[in-house]
């Protein structure tokens, strides 16, 4: 019965994702990160930072890391939204395996001097959930509705057709409330079960040590040393992609 229920959920998800333009994909891994180190940006300031040199460099460096390992890498500028603030962020969707994705996340966390990097791995019967919501409403309307429903933190992106919202629900604490958000916004929602991983620490020095440990362990086993590129002038000045495309 459990397997049959899982099959029904998968079939429903595939149908809904087709209507949403493949907002989430069961075979991919996801990285949510930010280059921002300033505290409590307003929504307006965060949106303005999406076209900054900081953001362009972050995407260019993420591109170089992902493209050196993945057959497919999709990266987009997004807003990370919290209860009363936002920050310019980016989302990476790739076909990397879990250890490679953890390596990618740690390299980004280290390079961007971050406290945390959030990862999500689709996994049958996982205890966490990734929601993707598509609505024709504006970015501001979507953010406001999500905050009123206490569904932050979340990730949003505006496009020509409206707004996309991603919610990583660790421990499935939100239940089906994201469906309620989609209904309120006149949109649609799909979800994937999986495992979320929050790399890092509130203390940036401790976070850097955690990233270093992950990087060192991977490079020792895989004999790949992308960390040697982190502080090069080439990466520091990068502002264009090499192989990645926008997240659909």
Image (cartoon, rainbow, N blue to C red):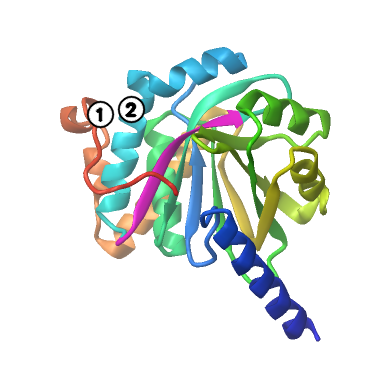
Mark toward the start of the polypeptide (1 vs 2):
2
Q: Which residue is pictured at 77% across the width and 30% down the height?
A: 145
Which disc, if any, is residue 7?
none
Q: Is residue 143 left or right of residue 197?
A: right
Q: Is residue 193 left or right of residue 21?
A: right
Q: Secondary structure at mark 2?
A: helix
Q: Nearer the viewer, residue 176 or 216?
A: 176
Q: Nearer the viewer, residue 223 or 159?
A: 159
Residue 167 position in % (x across, y down): 66, 44
Q: Which residue is pictured at 57% across the width and 14% down the height?
A: 44
Q: Quadrant of the N terminus?
A: bottom right
Residue 14 position in % (x across, y down): 60, 68
From the image, give the main secondary structure of the stretch colored magenta. strand
Say if residue 77 shows up in the picture: yes
Rendered view: 120 above or below 49: below
The answer to the question of whether label 1 and label 2 lie on touching residues, with beta carbons closer than 8 A, is: yes
- Residue 77 in magenta stretch: yes
Q: Dot 1, crowdedness within 10 Å: few (<14), some or many (≥20)?
A: some
Residue 21 position in % (x across, y down): 52, 54
Q: Nearer the viewer, residue 55 or 10?
A: 10
Disc 1: which residue: 239
Q: Which residue is pictured at 37% across the width and 18% down the height?
A: 52
Magenta span: 71-80
Q: Secondary structure at mark 1?
A: loop
Say if residue 213 shows up in the picture: no
Which disc, if any, is residue 56?
2
Q: Dot 2, crowdedness within 10 Å: few (<14), some or many (≥20)?
A: many
Number of numbered labels in the structure image: 2
Rendered view: 186 above or below 113: below
Q: Is residue 14 left or right of residue 218?
A: right
Rendered view: 160 above or below 124: above
- Between the C-alphas of marks 1 and 2, the distance is 5 Å
């Amino acid at each position: 019965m459990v397997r049959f229920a899982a099959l029904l959920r998968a079939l429903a998800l595939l149908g809904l994702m087709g209507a949403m333009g493949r907002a989430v994909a069961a075979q991919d891994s996801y990285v949510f990160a930010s280059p921002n180190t300033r505290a409590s940006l307003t929504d307006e300031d965060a949106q303005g930072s999406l076209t900054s040199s900081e953001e362009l460099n972050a995407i260019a460096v993420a591109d170089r890391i992902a493209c050196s390992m993945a057959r497919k890498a999709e990266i987009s500028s997004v807003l990370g939204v919290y209860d009363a603030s936002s920050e310019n962020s980016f989302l990476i969707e790739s076909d990397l395996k879990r250890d490679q994705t953890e390596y990618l996340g740690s390299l980004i966390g280290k390079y961007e001097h971050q406290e945390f990097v959030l990862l999500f791995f689709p996994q049958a019967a996982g205890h966490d959930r990734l929601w993707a919501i598509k609505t024709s409403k504006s970015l501001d309307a979507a953010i406001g509705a999500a905050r009123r429903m206490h569904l932050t933190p979340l990730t949003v992106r505006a496009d020509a057709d409206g707004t996309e919202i991603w919610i990583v629900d660790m421990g499935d604490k939100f239940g089906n409330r994201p469906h309620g958000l989609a209904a309120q916004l006149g949109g649609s929602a799909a979800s994937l079960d999986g495992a979320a991983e929050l790399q890092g620490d509130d203390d940036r020095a401790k976070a850097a040590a955690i990233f270093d440990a992950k990087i060192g362990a991977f490079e020792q086993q895989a004999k790949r040393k992308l960390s040697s590129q982190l502080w090069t002038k080439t990466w520091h000045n990068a502002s264009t992609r090499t192989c990645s495309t926008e997240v659909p």
